[in-house]
């Protein structure tokens, strides 16, 4: 059985994810086998917030040259989570 920490790998911090904070959406790197309901339950359990929706996307790894051969970065599954009004996750808060 998967635990909540197996499902949620880490939060993703980028310009695009910070732009989503205004809409109360947060982006996470998740286990590729995780389903939307598992992701929702894990986030609600870890951060004690109310999740309204979970959207997921698979991001294929880039093919990169390594000297004489080609290698490939790992594929990633991302979850874009929308929280209810008034809920926040402290990891993403900036020191303003």
Image (cartoon, helix red, strand yellow):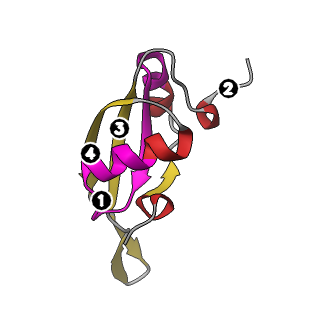
- Residue 82 among those drawn in magenta: no
Nearer to us of marks 1 and 3 is 1
Question: How packed is label 3: few (under 14 Cα within 10 Å), some, or many (20 or more)?
Answer: some
Residue drawn at (32%, 64%) of the image: 75
Marks 2 and 4, how far apart at CA: 25 Å
Residue contact between numbered discs 2 and 4, judged by CB atoms under 8 Å: no
Marks 4 and 1, how far apart at CA: 10 Å
Identify the secondary structure beneath mark 1: loop
Identify the secondary structure beneath mark 2: loop
Query: Mark 3 or 2 closer to N-term?
Result: 3
Give the x, y percent position of residue 19. 46, 23
Question: How packed is label 4: few (under 14 Cα within 10 Å), some, or many (20 or more)?
Answer: some
Nearer to us of marks 2 and 1 is 1
Mark identifier at residue 94 = 2
Residue contact between numbered discs 4 and 1, judged by CB atoms under 8 Å: no
Residue drawn at (26%, 48%) of the image: 36
Question: How packed is label 2: few (under 14 Cα within 10 Å), some, or many (20 or more)?
Answer: few
Residue contact between numbered discs 3 and 4, judged by CB atoms under 8 Å: yes
Q: Report the magenta residues as a range.
A: 19-42
Residue contact between numbered discs 1 and 3, judged by CB atoms under 8 Å: no
Q: Which residue is mark 3?
A: 80
Residue drawn at (36%, 62%) of the image: 31
Query: Mark 3 or 4 closer to N-term?
Result: 4
Q: Which residue is mark 4?
A: 56
Marks 2 and 1, how far apart at CA: 29 Å
Residue contact between numbered discs 2 and 1, judged by CB atoms under 8 Å: no
Left or right? Give the position of 57 relative to 88: left
Left or right? Give the position of 47 relative to 2: right
Mark identifier at residue 34 = 1
Give the x, y percent position of residue 51. 38, 32
Answer with the quarter of the image where residue 79 lies.
top left
Kindly give the residue lying farthest to the bottom in the view shown.
Answer: 68
């Amino acid at each position: 059985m998967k635990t909540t920490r197996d499902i949620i790998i880490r939060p993703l911090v980028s310009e695009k994810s910070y732009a989503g904070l205004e809409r109360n959406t947060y982006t996470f790197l998740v286990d590729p086998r995780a389903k939307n309901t598992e992701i929702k339950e894990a986030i609600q359990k870890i951060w004690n917030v109310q999740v309204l929706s979970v959207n997921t996307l698979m991001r294929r790894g880039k093919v990169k040259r390594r000297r004489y051969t080609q290698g490939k970065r790992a594929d990633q599954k991302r979850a874009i989570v929308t929280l209810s009004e008034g809920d926040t996750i402290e990891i993403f808060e900036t020191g303003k």
